[in-house]
Amino acid sequence: MKNRYNWLIHLILIIGCAIVMFPVVFAVIKATQTRSAVLTPSLVPGTEFFTNLRAVWVEASLWKFMRNSFVVAIAVTIGKTILSLFAGMALVYFRFPAKRFIFGFILLTLMMPTEVLLVPLFDLVSQRPPASWEAFWLWFRDPRHVFLEPSPFGFGWANTYWAIIVPFLASATGTFLFRQHFMAIPQSLADAARIDGATPFQFLSRILVPMSVNTIGALAVIQFVYVWDQYLWPKVIIRREDYQVVQVGLNLIIGTGEGVQWGYVMAGALLTLIPPLLVFALLQEQFMRGFALSESK
Amino acid sequence: MMKQFLAVLSLVALLGMAMAQTNIEFWYAFSDDARSGWIQDRISEFNEQLSADGKDYQVVGERKGSYRETLDAAVLAARQGTPPHLVQLFEVGSQLAVDTGIFEPVGNVGGGIDLSDYIEPVINYYTIDGAVNSIPFNSSSPILYINKDLLEAAGLDRNLVPETYSDILSACETIAASGIEAKCIGFNLHSWFFEQWMAEQGAPLVNNGNGRDERATEVLLTSDAAKNIVSWIKNLNDNGYYTYTGKLEDWDGSDAIFTNQQAVFHITSTADLGNITAATKEAGFELGAGKLPIADGAERNGVVIGGASVWLTTGHPEEELEVAKDFIIYMTNTENMVSWHKLTGYYPVRNSSVDELTAEGWFAEDPNYQVAFDQLLETIPNQATGGALMGSFLETRTIIEEAIQKVLNGAEVDAALEEAKKLADAALADYNSNF
Amino acid sequence: MRDHAVFKSRFLPWLLLLPSLIILAIFIYFPALQTFVLSFYKSNLRLGTRRFTGFENFYNLFAGAFAPAYRQIFLQSILFSASVVFIGLALSVVLATFASQKIVGARVYRLFLIWPFALSPAVAATIFAFLFNPEVGGVNLILNELFGIKPRWLDTPWLAFMLVVGAAVWKNLGYNIVFYLAALQNIPKEYAEAAAIDGAGPIARFFRITVPMLSPMTFFLLFTNLTFSFFDAFGIIDILTRGGPVGYPPFDNAGMTTIMMYRVFQEGIEQGKSGFAAAFSLFILTIIIIITVFQFRYGSRRVQYGDN
């Protein structure tokens, strides 16, 4: 009975795949064509791929945007994973007052995407820092200033990497995933470790981390893709090409008007796509297992 | 021992000082290679001069995208205390720029600036409260571009230059009746043209002396002058004479319509004269130019000078600002304004540059440039042609454009303009209430 | 909360939590508080001015001169989100179900379907911007060749709206399919087999077994897709249409592809009205909170859990 429908399944899947693939196949073909061929309906791959690639990489300074994105994505991915691991461990393997409240405090941030906080976050990151600690203390010691008035100070981080790294180092999703995962690890392991006299950090590095490879992989994929793909925040807070990330840089390459070198732009778009694709491909197994595990719990 | 150590130390310090050049940052808004390349060339020339003079300064140029983005980037940097020294800003951002308080009027820097050589309408625009705030750089106004070959194909005189709205309409009638494929007229939907048509009729865009006597409080969008303009556009559109890409402020798109010979007439900036002349040669038709057509019965008051100027920011050592100022004066000197004009079609903002171009026979060689120039020189200096000042100019532009688009989509002129006035006044009141 | 606590230290758990807590407090909670505070101020980024104005921003949002524009933006944001979420999830669940069948080449199909996981809004929009460019885009070159038409995709109100929805759906398809495939792996085969023996056809099985069994995942994806359509679609809109074009009545008060987040950006950053933008953000935040509460209150009851 299965065979009766197989052709239909294939047909639908082929149509589905074709629709999903078409835009990117189109981009790949156009990225290989000459300047004049790019503007024709021709879908015959050309020979100019490396010329276009070089043009967008060097002349349009895509290399700079890519470098910035790499720095930011790697810093955030590593930082987020470590901080979430720590927080998850604290929440599961220690007893301390107000634990439920702290967990709630972390989880509640899921409801507040940074985009909604765009304007005050922009103020906080871009305003000038207080002139001195005294100035800061004068402001800070009065709760009316802190709670009822717009803040006069910030970090002065606009146009720096700090602005696109530090605010994203903590993660409710990550903490939640690690907590769920640790709860699923048999209690006996932790007890055994303690009896053997392992310190919490030995326990972390020798037992928890090796047992959490899938979760770490899954989180790394999500975070890397998330940070790599960010657009609004860097667009707003970074106004110098030297520190701009690739997603916004790509738009700078398009510029305005009809005189766009679409062949270059398509080559640039494809290059931008490759790093998250690689990370996803490399960690796909861990990713699927990491999620299947937390799904079934 | 100690002596030697000190000697080495001072040597290192000296070397360090020699290496440590102070950067003078210049942020500009052109993203096309020709224009930003021209600016970069002037920067390298100036830097060579600086190092030949043994000065430890260096001008560094950085392009920032649109004018709006350039202004925002400068404000953001100033908030952190690291503003660039020089910022290229468009004319409609003038009030806003003054209000941000991050700019230093150029007259206050060093020995001020000698204005005697600048063309009057240009200085007229950039004088706010009696002070010249910035150094004019790239200035332009809109003119009528004509495809002479298509005119002839439609059975009209190939040297016809329509002067008024009704001239255009009657030419359009003939063109439509002739059955040629091209539309009569195309221009991009931009508030800039509306502003120019207001000025041509001597009508201020905002109250309080076009915002120059006092802060403006009202946008005069329901005046007869405003209605003349929008009714004419509606008339063109309803008769099928008008074409545009559908996108607001689509300069390149409307240029393409004209150079692809899909429209007989085209209205756009003189700054595109260079590009369009080149494109028409490629497309193989003869290009004519005329002054901006104006409303019937109005005295030709002239145009508001559009474009941009360069502003100096506050918060830098006096010496750095002087170098910055020197650079801008160098970039806009007689000779450089001549080459800038030839490259782009932007007006050379100095009288001496105009004289040089005339002496060279540049205008005689290409009468289209002469047309553009006459339009500017014949402008009557008054508050209408001096250009409006308002803090919410950017919002107002969007409101005007959307109102015209509504009219093109079928709305009544009076209703659309009343609605637009309500919105523009609200935006202006909102801006003014910041103070 | 099950208690796994094994290590005894008063000091260490706080040390482990502190970095996360500090960052969340400074970069989430403090800005959230400031959003609230700022919404009562008239504040301008460019001018650096701030003045307490009470409810003026909220008045402007709901009853001021531009209120009709905000109403239109609210309506079309809902329409946009509903379209993106519904079309996106429906397509994904169907494709994922087919791709998880035991057929020849299933792995290849899956590969072709899930790679857009790595696609960013900006890249998706960039490719779409070229593909649908009226003069030189691939779609119009082909349409022109076949039918002699060149639709102006990005400048025609409803076409632009549909195009933005299409780009958003395409961008998110990989993400949705990945998660559906993971969930499909966890559905025990016996259910389908039992239903097949009972004589249920494949379509009946899909609706009676697959869809209900996937509901926890759908519940999760509903939330992430909603967030995506509210916020991450920003990049797509910014690159493709910048919020335009203005539509026909009654959609003529603002650009048809302006979603709420885009307007917050335009007014708060581009026009520098940070106080007003904060009030607008607060409105969006309220919607998010209502949706979340609603989902957890009513959504979770109807969800079928696989291991029950």
Image (spheres, coloured by chain):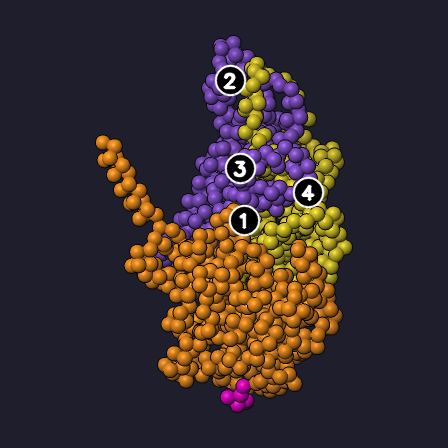
Chain colours: A purple, B orange, C yellow
Residue A200: numbered disc = 2
User: Percent x, y for residue A102?
Assistant: 64, 26
- Crowd rating for badge 1 (residues with CA inside 10 Å; few <14, some 14–19, many 20+): many
Q: How far is mark 4 from mark 1, CA to CA?
A: 21 Å
If the image is split into quadrants, where does the C terminus of chain A sit? top right
Mark 2 falls within which chain? Answer: A
Location of mark 3 (residue):
A132
Q: Are labels 4 and 2 on one chain?
A: no
Same chain assignment for discs 3 and 2: yes
Question: What range is drawn magenta here?
Answer: B156-161
Classed neighbour count for the residue bearing mark 2: other residues with Cα under 10 Å, few (<14), some (14–19), many (≥20): many
Residue matched to label 1: B79
Report how far apart the C-alphas of labels 3 and 2 lie in the structure: 39 Å
Contact (CB < 8 A) between labels 2 and 1?
Answer: no
Q: Nearer the viewer, mark 2 or mark 1?
A: 1
Furthest toward the right, the residue is C63
**Residue C145 in the image, given as x and y percentages of width and height:** 51, 67
Q: Earlier in the sequence, mark 3 or mark 2?
A: 3
Secondary element at image label 3: loop
Location of the N terminus of chain A (image quadrant):
top right
Identify the chain of the residue marked 3, using the numbered disc in the image: A
Question: Which mark is in front, 3 or 4?
Answer: 3
- Check disc 2 and give the amino acid type: Pro
- Look at the image and say whether residue B158 sits in the magenta stretch: yes
Of badges 1 and 3, the one in the foreground is: 3
